[in-house]
Image (cartoon, rainbow, N blue to C red):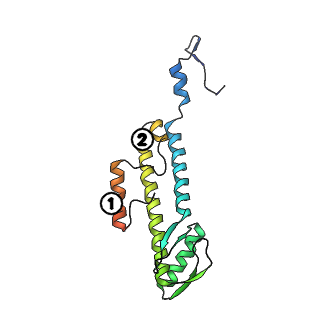
Amino acid sequence: MDGILLYRWDGAQVLPRTEEEIAADRIPPLKSVRASKLAELSAACNAAITAGCDVVLADGTAGHISLTAEDQINLTNACASAEAGSETYPYHLDGQLCALYPAADIAAMGRAATAHKLYHTTYYNHLAAWVRRCETVEVVQVITYGAALPDDLAANMAAILAAAGGSAGAV
């Protein structure tokens, strides 16, 4: 019924397969489970990135910026304008009207977005390394986005983020 063969040919006769043989066929190959898990984790990473991040502005107020591909382009343009000397730039925080923000606030938005994207991209890459080194289907299947990394991967990720000036607590 599920496509698993119940009988086998031993060269002379048809014999029923053992429960162990049947159970082994029901476990998907490690390679395909890894590929599915990597796709799942990549989608979760992309969702986390595009969901955006919070930012604190120079006056102490906070807001949220989404980071879809279009938002990232718009923010990159805003940051480039601020870096080129514009004192203000029109932008909008999620759910708010477009407003003129001082260059310092535009820069703060850019830094927050960059740190957010760096964190999630780096975290995904470490999850992917973990998946690739797993030797059983069962271990791969329990890895989820947001899971604590094994100690060696967690230490490596923390070192990378510290060198980049980021933090390790954003999931």
Label 2: how many Cα within 10 Å (few below 14, some 14–19, many 20+): some
Which residue is drawn at the image coordinates 57% and 75% (left, top)?
74
- Residue at far top of view: 12
Looking at the rendered structure, which numbered label has been put on residue 134?
Answer: 2
x, y percent for residue 59: 47, 81
- Residue 158 relative to residue 8: left or right: left
Q: Is residue 59 above or below residue 116?
A: below
SS at badge 2: loop
Give the number of marks.
Answer: 2
Q: What residue type is disc 2 on?
A: Cys
Which residue is drawn at the image coordinates 41% and 53% (left, top)?
126
User: Mark 1 sits on what residue?
Assistant: 159
x, y percent for residue 125: 44, 55
- Residue at far right of view: 1
Residue placed most toward the observer, 112 or 25: 112
Q: Is residue 156 above or below residue 87?
A: above
x, y percent for residue 86: 51, 88
Q: In the rendered view of the protein, which quadrant contains the N terminus?
A: top right
Q: Is residue 60 above or below residue 53?
A: below
| Quadrant of res 156 | bottom left
